Every structure is written in structure tokens, then in C-alpha cells.
Amino acid sequence: MDRQLLSGDEAVALAALHTGIALGTGYPGTPSTEILETFDALGGRAQWAPNEKVALEVALGAAFANARALVTMKHVGLNVAADPLFTAAYTGVGGALVVVTADDPGMSSSQNEQDNRRYAIAAGLPMIEPSDSQEAYDFFVAAVEMSERWHIPVLFRMTTRVCHSKSIVAARAGGGASAPAPRPHFEHDINGRVMIPANARPAHRRLRAKLAEIGEWGETCPLNRVERSGGDGSIGIVASGISYMHAVEAAPDASFLKIGLVNPLPIEKVRTFAASVRRTFVVEEGDPVIADSLRAAGIAVDSKPEMYRFGELDVARVRRILAGDTSPEVASARGKPPELCPACPYHTVYATLQKHDCIVAGDIGCYSLGVLPPYKAMDTCVAMGASIGVGLGLRHVLPDEEARRVVSIIGDSTFVHSGISGLVEMAYNPPRTGHVVIVLDNGTTAMTGQQEHPGTGRRLDHGPTNQLSIEGLATAIGIPSVTVIDAYAEPEEFDRLLQQRLAATELSVIVARRPCILAAADIRKWEGQAAEFRARAAEQSAVCEPGEENR
Ligand SMILES: Cc1ncc(C[n+]2csc(CCOP(=O)(O)OP(=O)(O)O)c2C)c(N)n1
Ligand code: SF4
């Protein structure tokens, strides 16, 4: 058997390869990003989508064509993809669809610590949760098998420690899923996939029936297992994911019911387990999802006090939980706060915004660091793409002299992800004082480790593809003033431009373009390789007669 030291993300990528995943799609987001990057490096077909909703839709289409598909995202990405997700639960799939949601308890690199186990319950989808890299590999194979057996998308929940910790993985001899990957083909199933109300009503009933069946299977499936310690049976712990690993170390004498299928929960298995021990304790990170469900089913369990809902668990915290210790915790020492790289192209932009005392509706990316000293030049930051809508809202209601100071600032990847519809709103409902949007185009998705996006004109593997023109798009949307500038190289020119645009009542987009200093060398290398592709594309569009370009 092939044994390797892998992170949870790498183990999922390997399992995806071994199970014959025909297409992996996603949008970068810590801690999920490495799954698709590794899948690509292993030879799988992986591609970044503009955002998580599109990624899920592309994967769903592949699964409608009876292929096996994977889609990856961080926990907040599932909010973006939630619309198709809920209805995909009704349509089901022909092949297999595994949706990885990588949650970030403790918010090491996120804007919230939502617990996506709630999505499984709300959407009515099965959810699997591994505890280490071996389980990430084995459970992914199981997820593909479940998805194909019940024709249902399967949610695969990972958390930061499982995604990034490395442990030994023994890959299955001969590969992954028991059945070979099917050949993609299309079969009409209009009633099953066109979710008009007449079709959606029976589809909802079908979904609930599938879930009931999966719930019954879950009572005896190998994903949920009882581990007896040989202890005195005084405490039984119910746990899943990384919490299980901490609990095993914190309470080696306890008996365990290790849950791998977190939705639907194996209620009867827990009931039997609880009856075999004197006290049943649920150890879980984040929200009390398992504890609440067990109590609702009439099973008496103990669970953590509210103070442990926040942040990650670790062995010491689990010991405290089991001991009922609610004394204040010692705050861990704070590391050095992050800061913009010394030669980051964003410095001039933030210095200028600060100088003119702008009210800055900000967004998520490396550029969020503009909120920290010395600039402190960001006033709001809520969700990817929100800067434009929030800026417009401020402009609509503030008195004119204040409204004129409002600027929305957004990164290039974030603009493509979910800023475009904000710009459409700006053209559609322009504030009386106009508005200024600055797109910080550093040619990469820097925040998550320099991934490509449609604006870079390069695919996930950095090879050339069609390039979205941000300025061209802004012009097409109807923004009258669109300017491209290298603010870092021309600080005075940028200062003048900003003042002029703030004074105008016209809508403005300023594209501040200069490569991220950490990515610049790679971008130059990849662009050199892409030169021929671009020349060919330009030649083709030049010979295209008007009216021919949409064929
Ligand atoms: C819905 C959602 N998906 C993914 C992320 C992870 N993420 C945070 S910022 C960001 C994009 C940053 O790229 P860009 O806008 O180009 O700014 P840069 O980091 O390059 O400055 C991503 C992918 C997130 N926070 N929310
Ligand atoms: S990684 Fe790039 S975008 Fe991020 S702070 Fe450094 S130079 Fe700026």
C-alpha cells in the first residue's frame, strides 16, 4: 500500500484523482485552496471559477452528465453558492458531486466563524467530516460512493487543522471508489432537473425520503464507530472532526462514539451508546450542533459551556470543558500584526485616501491591511464584493459634503468574484453626488497565495486563456469615467485624479494597476509564455468582421 505524508487538503486531492473525478472546480479560500492546486499538480482537471456559485454550477452540470465532480471553497464561499446548493439537493445528480466546505473556527484567515454543519441540516444534504488526512482520503472515497448511490450532492466538511495538518495516508490499493468512474453522457430527465414548482414539490419529498434512507444506513455504516477504552465506562464522548482528535488525547480512558456522518446523525446508535456509559459528553468545536440535535431526540448529554463556542478547540481546552472549568482563559500571546509588504503597490493608494480623509468602503483581500496603522484608511469591510454596494448606500444618504468623500475600494479578484453586480447597481441607481470605485489590480489573488482569476487571463495552471478587461467591462456597464493608472509609479498623478473624481458628480472607476511585488516575477514568466496566445487572439479578433464576433 502506498503511504505518504499528506495534509488533509492533499489527501482529498489524491482521493479525487483515485476516484476518477472528471472535473474539480472552486474559488480560492483558506483553508481549502490547496485541494485544487494539488489535484492539478497530480494531473487532475482543475479550474478556478470566478466565484463559488459558478464553481458549484459548473460541477453540478458535470454531475448531471453522469461524471464525478468536485467543488471546493471556504466556509463563507458556501454562502455565495447556497442558492444552487439548496435546489441541487432537490435535483440530485447523475454522477457524483462532492462539495468541500473548509470551515475556519477561530477565524485564522476569515471574516466570520460560521459553522457549516448548519448548511447540511438546512439544505437537507448528507455531510461527512474527517478527523485527519487518512480519513480525508477514505471519507472522500465514501462521499463519492454515497453521492452515486443516492444520486445526491454530498457536503464534505473540513476545518483548518484537518486541512493543513500532515499525517500518514495509506492510499487504497488499486485506487479509490469501488466502481470505475462512469463515462459522461446525457440522459433527459426534465421532471427531475427542471425545478418549476410542479417538479420541485415531488423532488422535495424525494430528497426527504433519500435522507431518511441515508439516516438508516448511517446507524451501521463504518463512518460512525464506537471505540471502547477499557475504562470504567464512566464517560462516553461523542465527537467528530478535529474535536475527536483533541478529545482522544484529553480523555484517553473514555469510550468514544466517533461520528463521521454528521448529517443525518446516527441517533439510535448514540442512544445505545449513551445507555452504555454513566455520562455522555458531546465534544464539538463551534456551534452546539450535535448536542442540540441529540437533546431534541431526547438523549441526555452534557456539552461545553457557551464560552467554548468561540475559537478553535485544542487538547487543553477540551480538558477544561470535560472538567467543567469556566474560569477565564489565558489569552494567547498575539504575534506581530500583519502589514503590507514594503513595496506593495497599495501604499500610495492608501496614503492618498488617508490624506483626503476619505470615507472608505473596503473589501476583502491583502488590501484589507489598509485598515491598520499607519493608514487606517478603511471604514467598512463585510463580505467579498460588498464595498461597492456599501459605498453606494453611504453616498445615497449622507449629506452631500460627506457623501463626496466616499470611495469604494476592491481588489481585482474580488471585483470579478462579486463586484461586477455592484458596478451594475452603480450605473443603474447612481447617487446624486456620483461615486468613485478604485479597483486595485495587482494581477493576482494575493491574499490566498497568488491564484489566477479571469482578469489575469491565465488558468489555474497559469497557462493562457481569455482575459477579462476590467476597464472594458466598466465602460460596457456604462461608467462614464474609467481611468487606468499605476498609482505607485505616479503618486502625484493619482492624487490629482482622485481629487478630480471626488469633485465630479460623474460615476468613476479608477483601475490602479501594478503587480503584487511577490507575484511580479512569476507573472512576467507566465506572461512571456502567454505572448503567443495573446498575439493569436488579437489577430483573430482583428480579422473578425462586425457582427461576426458572437458566433
Ligand atoms: C466568499 C469568499 N470566498 C473566498 C474568500 C477568500 N478570499 C479572501 S479575499 C480573496 C480575494 C483576494 O484577491 P484580490 O481581491 O485580488 O485582492 P489581493 O489579495 O490580491 O489584494 C479571497 C479569495 C472569502 N473571504 N470569501
Ligand atoms: S503580497 Fe502583494 S498585495 Fe499582498 S501586501 Fe504584499 S505586495 Fe501587497
Image (cartoon, helix red, strand yellow):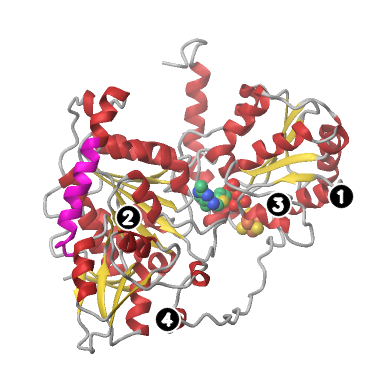
Magenta stretch contains residue 144: no
- Cα gap from disc 1 to disc 2, whole angstroms: 47 Å
Query: In the shown orientation, is residue 223 left or right of residue 118?
Result: left
Is residue 213 on the magenta stretch? yes
Q: What residue type is labelled 3?
A: Pro
Residue under label 2: 156
Dot 1: what SS? helix
Residue 315 is marked as 4
Can you say whether 274 is above or below 211 in the image?
below
Residue 5, placed above or below residue 393 = below
Of the residues tagged 3 and 4, which is closer to the observer? 4
Q: Distance between the residues labelled 2 and 4?
A: 24 Å
Question: Which tag, 1 or 2, sits closer to the chain's start?
Answer: 2
Q: Which amino acid, mark 4?
A: Val
Which range is magenta? 205-222
Left or right of 89, for residue 409: right
Q: Which amino acid does label 1 sit on?
A: Lys
**Residue pointed to by mark 3:** 345
| Figure quadrant of the C terminus | top left
Mark closer to the chain start, 2 or 4: 2
Marks 2,3: beta carbons within 8 A? no
User: What residue is at 16 percent from the left and 55 percent from the top?
Assistant: 216
Mark closer to the observer (2, 4) = 4
Q: How crowded is mark 2: few (under 14 residues within 10 Å), some or many (20 or more)?
A: many
Secondary element at image label 2: strand
Asked if residue 462 shows in the view, the reply is: no
The tag earlier along the polypeptide, 3 or 4, is 4
Q: Name the residue under label 1.
A: 355
Q: Nearer the viewer, residue 12 or 534?
A: 12
Q: How many residues crowd mark 1 within 10 Å: few (<14), some (14–19), many (20+)?
A: few
Dot 1 or dot 4: first in sequence order is: 4
